[in-house]
Amino acid sequence: MMVIEAKGLTKHFLQKDGETVEALRGVDLSVPEGRLTALVGPDGAGKTTLMRLICGLMTKTAGELSVVGLDVTEHPQAVQDLLSYMPQKFGLYEDLTVQENLDLYADLHGVPQELRAKRFAHLLAMTELAPFTGRLAGKLSGGMKQKLGLACTLVRSPKLLLLDEPTVGVDPLSRRELWQILQQLVREEHLSVFVSTAYMEEAALCETVYVLNRGRFLKAGTPEELRSVAKGTCYAVRPPEGMPLRSLQSRLLAEHGILDAVPSGGVVRFILRGNPQELSTLATLDLAATPIAPRLEDGFMTLLKEDAAKSSILPETAKLGAFAATSLEEAPVEIEVQDLVRKFGDFTAVSHTSFAVHRGEVFGLLGPNGAGKPTTFRMLCGLLPATSGRLSVA
């Protein structure tokens, strides 16, 4: 049985200036029950619009759409009674505890009292929130909030679970835990899950992936089938000593035929429809490119860039070709942090941190929720005084 079926699904929005925006253009979709299905696409592709149409939260302009065998236009309330939907910003009540949020959503969905104890115990164990039932939702980390949001959507047993980019802004460990929960729900409860995501490594965990761009599907298939789109076009090249990865990346992006180029693990991965020996950048720098296996992201980028070429839309990466190829070591230091410490009472949020950021450098802070990233940014912005250490900006 198909839990979602769409044929020629179209949605237009009329703007104030009288122009019509085509959010979805003749979409065909078939999602089988009991599976984990992903929807991927850039911002503005129409992912959230599609989710809201499936939920019966807005009406279609044209086409057909049925969910769990019901026509959404004719039976929106009946459809909503059979599914659970977790939007990007889930409506947790931060002044209520974990348990009080679960109780509230159980009340809203009319879950009988005799079923709650067993259901709550199962959800709390699955999300590992059992030790935190008395904690205010506002005091939870970002990852724990998302897991609580998921638990609240599952206080009843839905036929279909819809998740709209549930891991945006969540640290890598919590993202992994959330996806383990989703896989467990599909495996043990035979739940049908339709999820939109911005992360290709998450989409690779699904059985079927739909690629949406500018309101229409470019391709649908297994992760392996989407990877094969870029088969034979992926290469890696290591920059010469002293050259930053970004400098090599920008020079490659300026070359004709390069669909994408990204720094990764000390090399620059690039996608090329052609012979890498013909690239002037590699010839000038006397570099050799090594063929590598494609990733799902490579297939995704290939589809987007080829679609953009057909529509005469300049890919964003084509605008990156003007970066200077100077060594970062020669550039002045714009941000300097030495032995930085910030304490809140007995709690140390930032502990003896040191780093320097050169002009023209993209410098990343990576860490789980609670690692001290926002605290460091606030000190750099002058919004929060340091307990000790030195920091200078510009």
Image (spheres, rainbow, N blue to C red):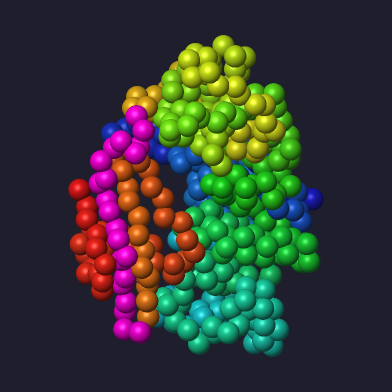
- Say which quarter of the image contains residue 20: top left
* Residue 133 figure quarter: bottom right
Which residue is nearer to you in this view: 261 or 69?
Answer: 261
Residue 384: percent from left, percent from top? 23, 68
Of 152 and 307, which appears nearest the observer? 307
Start-end of magenta stretch: 326-346
- In this view, 344 is above or below 57: below
Question: Relative to 323, is 221 on the left or the right?
Answer: right
User: Relative to 341, is 261 on the left or the right?
Assistant: right
Could you tell me residue 284's position as x and y percent? 48, 15
User: Residue furthest toward the front?
Assistant: 241
Front residue of 5 and 197: 197
Q: Residue furthest top?
A: 278
For image coordinates 30% across by 61% down, the residue present is 338
State whether residue 5 appears in this view: no
At x 35%, y 55%, the residue is 355
Q: Residue at x 73, y 34 (%)?
A: 225
Q: Return the residue nearer the eye: 306 or 65.
A: 306
Does 298 appear in magenta? no
The residue under the point 41% across, 55% down is 365
Q: Quick check: is 343 in the magenta stretch?
A: yes
Say whether residue 49 is left or right of residue 343.
Answer: right
Q: In this view, does 2 lie above or below 222?
A: below
Label count reads 0
Q: How far across and how far down the image is residue 387, in percent?
A: 26, 73
The answer to which quarter of the image holds residue 288 is: top right
In percent of width and height, residue 307 lies at 54, 24
**Can residue 198 be seen by looking at this rendering?**
yes
